[in-house]
Image (cartoon, rainbow, N blue to C red):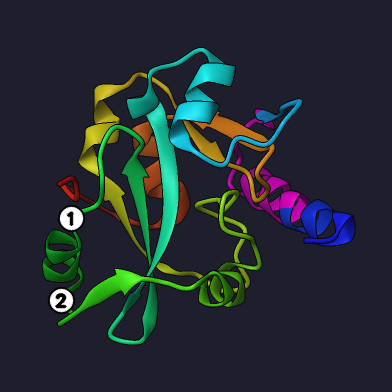
């Protein structure tokens, strides 16, 4: 990703959060945090409080699953919740096309068009959660309830 791509992805997330009335709580970190463990370490929170935005291919269409960093997504559960036959991990190219963001920094908002979204109920176990802000070095603080509202997502259990 060029620095221009990164800046525009971050700015799209910032703009979407502002439109939703979310206080600008984007934190730009000194280094990339492409994994939940790396993000939790830098932010000083539990890994389960990291909201991983994972794009899957669901019968050919993008499906965003915002999952707790504390576990893996059960694709069979995700498929049942989404009412599709098959859910599989999307390619980096598919992710970028659907979100305008690169793998390792995908945010739950700021995409070119709304994505069907499932939000992991395990995130409700945390008073605050941290989600990606469109680039691998930025995160924003939110709550489970606000995350569901921001994404227009469906709160479901997706963990394996």
Residue 83 shows which numbered tag? Answer: 2
Residue 12 falls within the magenta-colored stretch: yes
The N terminus sits in image quarter: bottom right
Q: Nearer the viewer, residue 153 or 66?
A: 66
Q: Is residue 56 above or below residue 133?
A: below
Q: Is residue 26 above or below residue 54?
A: above
Q: Position of residue 149 (x, y in %)?
A: 40, 47
- In the image, the segment drawn in magenta is 10-25
Q: Could you tell whether 155 is left or right of 9 in the image?
A: left
Give SS at disc 1.
loop
Magenta segment's dominant SS is helix
Q: Nearer the viewer, residue 89 or 128?
A: 89
Name the front one of labels 2 and 1: 1
Q: Assess disc 2: are there few (<14), some (14-19) or many (≥20) residues with their C-alpha within 10 Å of its C-alpha.
A: few
Q: Assess disc 1: are there few (<14), some (14-19) or many (≥20) residues with their C-alpha within 10 Å of its C-alpha.
A: few
Identified at 31% across, 49% down, the residue is 119
Q: Could you tell whether 75 is left or right of 107 in the image?
A: left
Q: Position of residue 63 (x, y in %)?
A: 36, 69
Identified at 45% across, 28% down, the residue is 37
Q: Could you tell whether 34 is left or right of 55 in the image?
A: right
Could you tell me how far apart the alpha carbons at marks 2 and 1 are, in whole angstroms?
14 Å
N-term-proximal mark, 2 vs 1: 1
Q: Position of residue 57 (x, y in %)?
A: 36, 76
The residue indicated by pointer 1 is 74
Q: Could you tell whether 83 is left or right of 133 in the image?
A: left
Residue 160 falls within the magenta-colored stretch: no
Q: Position of residue 30 (x, y in %)?
A: 76, 25
Choose top left, top right, bottom left or bottom right for residue 151: bottom left
Task: Point out the residue furthest to the top here.
Answer: 44
Identified at 64% across, 61% down, the residue is 101
């Amino acid at each position: 990703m060029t620095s221009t791509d990164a800046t525009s992805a971050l700015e799209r997330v910032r703009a979407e959060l502002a439109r939703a009335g979310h206080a600008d709580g984007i934190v730009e970190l000194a280094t990339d945090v492409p994994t939940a463990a790396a993000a939790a370490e830098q932010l000083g929170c539990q890994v389960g409080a990291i909201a991983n935005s994972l794009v899957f291919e669901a019968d050919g269409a993008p499906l965003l699953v915002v999952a707790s960093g504390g576990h893996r997504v059960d694709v069979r559960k995700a498929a049942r919740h989404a009412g599709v036959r098959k859910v599989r991990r999307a390619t980096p190219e598919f992710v970028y096309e659907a979100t305008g963001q690169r793998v390792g920094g995908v945010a739950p908002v700021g995409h070119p068009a709304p994505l069907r979204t499932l939000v992991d109920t395990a995130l409700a176990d945390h008073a605050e959660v941290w989600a990606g802000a469109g680039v691998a070095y930025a995160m924003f603080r939110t709550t489970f309830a606000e995350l569901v509202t921001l994404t227009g997502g469906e709160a479901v259990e997706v963990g394996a």
